[in-house]
Image (cartoon, helix red, strand yellow):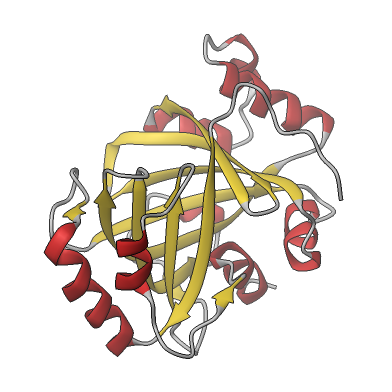
């Protein structure tokens, strides 16, 4: 399939592996030798809560399940329960490349979106907010599912590499519980751990060696899809 990538979006390579708890600990030990922990959270795991959007026809979910090469998702997320820093994001996928645009919003603004009060978005000075408004009007995007998980992250400057290890994936029973810390349930009884590797033009061979695990193949596992199917 041929497609044209956007001119003003920085694209990165991305691949995933489903790994075991033993794999996770091995990768953490290896990466700790040369890579640096996430500069915002250090060596400690941190919590991410995201609110994802989809339309009444489940367009984002269907495209993800069907492996559509060019797709996008809107989400709102915050970290470690800190509602002083909330971001609206649009993640775009172009085959094996991915891009992301972000805009800060407040807790009050997020709650207004959840409550269906969206007119303020069209007058925002932030282009991404205006785009969300347009999509909510034209494509009937609405908040659809909460995705919770814990993450360990490492960065490596050559290649602008970021390796993340996500686990304890949970989902909320209602999008109205975005700011309620206790209303989640496990999203997958298999308790998957997802290792993601993102990089710019190249991934250094030393990183490839450190994250290499025998008998582990690249995976298309989606935390979003898992949580959506749990809520069906």
Q: Residue at x 20, y 73 (%)?
A: 30
Residue lying farthest to the front in this orientation: 205
Please tell me which residue lies in front, 9 or 112.
9
Q: Determine the image quadrant of residue 163.
A: bottom left
Above or below, 126 relative to 220: above
Horizontal placement of 199 versus 182: left or right?
A: right
Q: Quadrant of the C terminus?
A: bottom right
Q: Which residue is drawn at 43% across and 59% down?
A: 197
Please tell me which residue lies in front, 231 or 19.
19
Please tell me which residue lies in front, 100 or 186.
100
Above or below, 116 relative to 170: above
Q: Position of residue 111 (x, y in %)?
A: 48, 36
Q: Determine the image quadrant of residue 33.
A: bottom left
Q: Where is residue 129 in the image (x, y as percent from the top left)?
A: 58, 23
Horizontal placement of 59 versus 175: left or right?
A: right
Q: Where is residue 152 in the image (x, y as percent from the top left)?
A: 27, 63
Please tell me which residue lies in front, 71 or 14.
14
């Amino acid at each position: 399939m041929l497609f044209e990538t956007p001119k003003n979006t920085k694209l990165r390579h991305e691949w995933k592996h489903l790994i075991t708890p033993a794999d996770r600990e091995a990768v953490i030990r290896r990466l700790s030798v040369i890579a640096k922990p996430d500069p915002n959270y250090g060596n400690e795991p941190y919590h991410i809560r995201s609110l994802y959007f989809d339309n009444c026809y489940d367009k984002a979910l269907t495209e993800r399940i069907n492996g559509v090469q060019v797709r996008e998702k809107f989400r709102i997320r915050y970290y470690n329960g800190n509602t002083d820093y909330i971001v609206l994001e649009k993640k775009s996928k172009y085959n094996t490349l991915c891009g992301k645009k972000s805009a800060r919003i407040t807790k009050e603004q997020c709650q207004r979106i959840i409550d269906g009060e969206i007119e303020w978005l069209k007058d925002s000075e932030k282009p991404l907010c205006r785009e969300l408004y347009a999509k909510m009007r034209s494509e009937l995007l609405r908040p659809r599912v909460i995705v919770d998980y814990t993450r360990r992250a490492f960065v490596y400057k050559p290649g602008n590499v970021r390796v993340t290890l996500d686990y304890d994936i949970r989902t909320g029973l209602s999008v109205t519980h975005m700011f309620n810390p206790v209303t989640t349930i496990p999203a997958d009884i298999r308790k998957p751990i997802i290792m993601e590797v993102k990089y710019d033009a190249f991934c250094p061979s030393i990183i490839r060696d450190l994250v290499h695990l025998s008998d582990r193949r690249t995976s298309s596992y989606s935390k979003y899809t898992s949580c959506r199917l749990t809520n069906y």
